[in-house]
Image (cartoon, grey):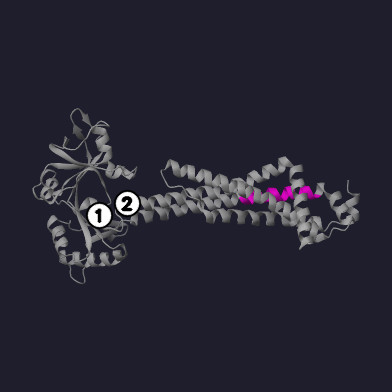
Amino acid sequence: MKRFLTLYGEIFRISINSILSTKLRSTLTILIISLGIMALVGILTAIESIEGSLTSSFTQMGANSFTIQSRGLRVNIGENRYRKKNFSHITLQQAREFIERYNFPADIGISVWATGASTIKHSSKKTNPNISVLGVDEGYLKVSGVDIGKGRNFSPIDIQDSRHVAIIGSEVASKLFLKNEDPINKIISVGSGKYKVIGVLKDKGTSFGGGPNRTVYLPYTNVAAYFSRPNMNYSIIVQPRDPKLLEAAVSEAEGTFRLVRNLSAIDENDFHIEKSDSLAKLLIENLKFVSIAATIIGIITLIGAAVGLMNIMLVAVAERTREIGTRKAIGAKSAEIKQQFLFEAILICQLGGLLGVFLGILIGNLVSILLNSPFVIPWGWIVGGLVISFIVGLASGYIPAVKASKLDPIEALRYE
C-alpha cells in the first residue's frame, strides 16, 4: 500500500509540474473542455429549472384539476381537403345539470368567456385594451388556483342576482389605483357597465398572456346578460378533493357529461376533457428537443477538445523524449510511463470539467433568475460532466501514452 501511494504520489507531482511547465497550452485545453461541459450543463440546468417553473405555475393555476370544454374536429372530405366540424357548445343548462348529477367528492366551477380585449376604466385612469373579462361562479377561483389578496369572493347571491360586482387581477389594480389606494368598493367601468370592486387577486407572477393578473372576473349571470352573444360556450373546471383520485374523477366526469349531452354508447365524445398539467407537459416535451441540441453542441465541442488534447500530448511526448529515455534507463517500467501520460490527460480534463460544471451551473441559473424560475443544482449532470471529462481524458491520452511507453530508452537518450 505504501509503495502504491508513493508511486501515484510521484506520478501526480510530475503531472502537475508538466502542466505548469506548459501553462498556455494546458490553459487553452482546459478552457476548450470547460466550454463543452459548460454548454452541456448550462443549457440543461436552465431547462431543468424552467421545467420546474412550468410544472409549478400550471399546478398553481389549478392543481390536480381538469376542464370540460366543447371541441372541434377536422373532418377529411377528400384528398388534402378538410372541413371543420363544430360540435355543439356547452350551455349554461348543461353545466348546471352536470353539477347536479356529478356525485364525486370534488369542487366545481363554471366559467364563460366575455372578451379578451377590454379597456377597464376608473375615474381618469384606464388600462390598455388587453384585459380579459371572464364570467365565473362562486366556486371558480378556488378550483382554478387563484387566491384573493384583498376583499372577498363572489357569493351565491351575487351570482343569483347577477350583481354588478367584480374581482380584478393585480395588474389591473395597479393600473387603475395608486399604490396606497384601496380598490375595494371602488367603481370601475367594464364595457358599458359599472361594477363595484369586491376583491383583488394576489399577484401570480408573469405568465403567458398576463394570466389572472390581467383579468377581470364578473358573475357569469351578469356576463350572460351584458356580454351576450349567440351560442355562448361555458367551461366546467373540476378539482377532486383527493389528488390521488384525479383519474377516477375524470372517468366519472366523462360518464356524467355523456349523460348530460344525451350521447348513446356508440357516440364519440362531443366534448373535451383537459387536465391542468397537459399544457405544461406539452411545453416540457418540446424542451427535450432543446436538451438534445445542447447535448449535440456539447459533444461536438468535447470532440474538438479531445483532438486538441491528443495533439498536445503527442507534442509533449516528442518534447520529453529524452526525459522518458532517462526514466526508463534508471528503471521506470513502460506501464509507469503510460500511466504518467494518461494521468496528465485525465487531470487536464478533470480541471476543465470542474470549471465547466461551475460555469454551467452559474450560467444556467442566471437564465433561470431572468425567467423567474427556481434555482437548480443538477447533481446528475455534475457527476455526468465529470465522468464525460474523465472519458475524454482517457480517450485522448491513450495513444500518446502508448507511444511514450514504447519508446526505446537508448534511442530516446540520443534524441535531440
The quarter of the picture where residue 372 lies is top left
Q: Which residue lies furthest to the front in this view?
A: 2
Q: Can residue 402 be seen in this view?
A: no
Q: Residue furthest top?
A: 124
Residue 262 vs residue 202, the one in the foreground:
202
Q: Kindly identify which residue carries mark 1.
A: 143
Residue 284 drawn above or below residue 416: below
The quarter of the picture where residue 108 lies is bottom left
Residue 194 vs residue 232, the one in the foreground:
194
The quarter of the picture where residue 163 lies is top left
State the quadrant of the N terminus: bottom right
Callout 2, which amino acid? Gln
Residue 155 vs residue 329, the one in the foreground:
155
Q: In this view, does 180 lie to the left or right of 397?
A: left
**Disc with the residue nearer the chain's start (2 vs 1):** 2
- Name the residue rendered at 18%, 29% in the picture: 123
Helix or strand or loop: what does disc 2 sit on?
helix
Residue 164 image position (x, y, % from top left) = 12, 42
- Name the residue rendered at 91%, 55% in the picture: 410
Callout 1, which amino acid? Val
**Marker disc for residue 60:** 2
- Name the residue rendered at 82%, 58% in the picture: 406
Residue 52 belongs to magenta span? no
Q: What stretch is highlighted in magenta?
A: 302-317
Q: In this view, does 235 lie to the left or right of 52?
A: left
Residue 233 image position (x, y, % from top left) = 18, 52
Residue 36 image position (x, y, % from top left) = 59, 48
